[in-house]
Image (cartoon, rainbow, N blue to C red):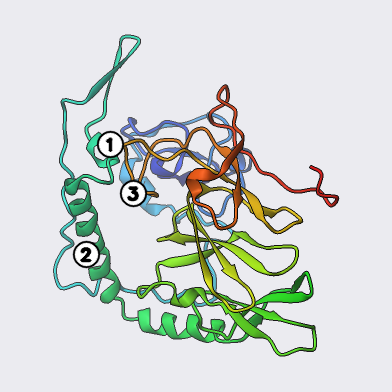
């Protein structure tokens, strides 16, 4: 009689959950039934099964556990962080309110959506629920006995000077540099490759809490290297506010362009202005908190901005009303004609 191996039905893809007796099959059939997977027993096809009520648990208990290559290892396992086990009491997860009145009807099929209220990020109830989740997360992380070790290790790995490749514009050279533990890279300028670099823009000082960052995609120096146009984003939002700085004396001009998103900046050769892309200003009553909206942004538009003018005077160069989800970009050609 061939050896019989007991396989728990929870590890098989073939539906055996409703059978009352243990599953047995011959060792010779094992190779044709299994795919090589280090974690799960997967059946390629429904096998030839034999159920033996008489053997039941007594016979099953005599069988040795099924072993797979790769499941056991002599290498030491990673030490668990013990975040949950270190807690003095069970986690009290915030309860999400169910609203069973929200039901959609799709062609006669009714679909319940009891948690749709969570889709409104501006609702006070949603903000409160998120804060409760934050508190729960912090309670677990604060109890992690290896958290400080991880912090020290990561800090050590990041604590070294880093440089980006320099780029030339006009008669000046620009590059980003980080001394090691700065939250954001600092933009430097120098008159020659051998010259002494001078910091031009330090985004680390743009806000007290560090939530304002420099958007690297929305940054461009005019051809004569007199002006730097750059985009700032808040709290990781894709929305950017474009500002303009004089390179020579680091004076920030009054030019402020809002509602820009997914855009580069392309200066005209005369240095009088640049092309950029933005979305229409929200109408009165619409969500004005950029970055918290949940609907799609529509009608991407290409504008030209003259230095020293208000954004309301910018020239609309292109939009596509028939394709509201399209996005655009613009680059000035080398000869400046296009």
Give the foreground label among 1 and 3.
1
Label 1 residue SS = loop
Q: Tell me the element at label 3.
A: loop
Tell whether 248 sits left or right of 308.
right
Of circles 2 and 3, the one toward us is 3
Q: Which mark is residue 285?
A: 1
Quadrant position of the N terminus in the picture: top right
Q: Are marks 2 and 3 in contact (CB under 8 Å)?
A: no
Cα–Cα gap, marks 1 and 2 = 32 Å
Q: Which callout, 1 or 2, points to the residue nearer the camera?
A: 1
The residue singled out by tag 2 in the image is 135
Q: Give the residue displayed 60% in from the left and 52% down from the top.
A: 306
Q: Dividing the picture into quarters, in which one does residue 207 lie?
A: bottom left
Foreground residue among 176 and 119? 176
Q: Is residue 84 shown to the viewer in this render? A: no
The span from disc 1 to disc 3 (Cα, nearest Å) is 11 Å
Q: Mark 3, residues whose alpha carbon is within 10 Å: few (<14), some, or many (≥20)?
A: few
């Amino acid at each position: 009689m061939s050896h019989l191996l007991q396989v728990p039905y929870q590890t098989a893809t073939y539906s055996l959950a409703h059978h009352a007796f243990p599953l047995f099959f011959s060792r010779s059939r094992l190779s044709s039934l299994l795919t090589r997977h280090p974690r799960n027993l997967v059946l390629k096809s429904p096998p030839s099964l034999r159920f033996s009520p008489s053997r039941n648990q007594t016979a099953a208990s005599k069988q040795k556990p099924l072993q797979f290559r790769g499941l056991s290892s002599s290498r030491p396992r990673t030490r668990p962080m013990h975040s949950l086990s270190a807690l003095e009491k069970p986690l009290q997860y915030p309860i999400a309110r169910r609203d069973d009145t929200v039901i959609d009807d799709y062609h006669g099929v009714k679909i319940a959506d009891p948690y749709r209220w969570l889709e409104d990020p501006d609702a006070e109830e949603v903000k409160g629920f998120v804060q409760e989740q934050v508190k729960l997360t912090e309670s677990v992380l604060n109890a992690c006995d290896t958290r400080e070790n991880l912090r020290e290790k990561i800090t050590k790995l990041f604590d070294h000077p880093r440089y980006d490749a320099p780029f030339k514009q006009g008669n000046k050279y620009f590059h980003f540099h980080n001394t090691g533990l700065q939250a954001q890279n600092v933009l430097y300028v120098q008159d020659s490759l051998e010259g002494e670099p001078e910091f031009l823009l330090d985004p680390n000082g743009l806000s007290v809490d560090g939530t304002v960052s420099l958007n690297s995609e929305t940054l461009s120096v005019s051809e004569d290297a007199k002006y730097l146009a750059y985009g700032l984003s808040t709290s990781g939002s894709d929305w950017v506010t474009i500002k303009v700085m004089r390179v020579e004396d680091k004076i920030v001009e009054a030019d402020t362009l809002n509602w820009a998103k997914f855009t580069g900046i392309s200066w005209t050769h005369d240095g009088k202005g640049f092309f950029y892309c933005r979305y229409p200003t929200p109408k009165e009553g619409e969500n004005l908190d950029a970055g918290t909206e949940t609907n799609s942004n529509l009608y991407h538009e290409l504008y030209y901005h003259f230095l020293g003018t208000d954004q309301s005077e910018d020239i609309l160069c292109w939009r596509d009303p028939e394709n509201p989800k399209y996005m655009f970009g613009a680059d000035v050609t080398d000869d400046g004609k296009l």
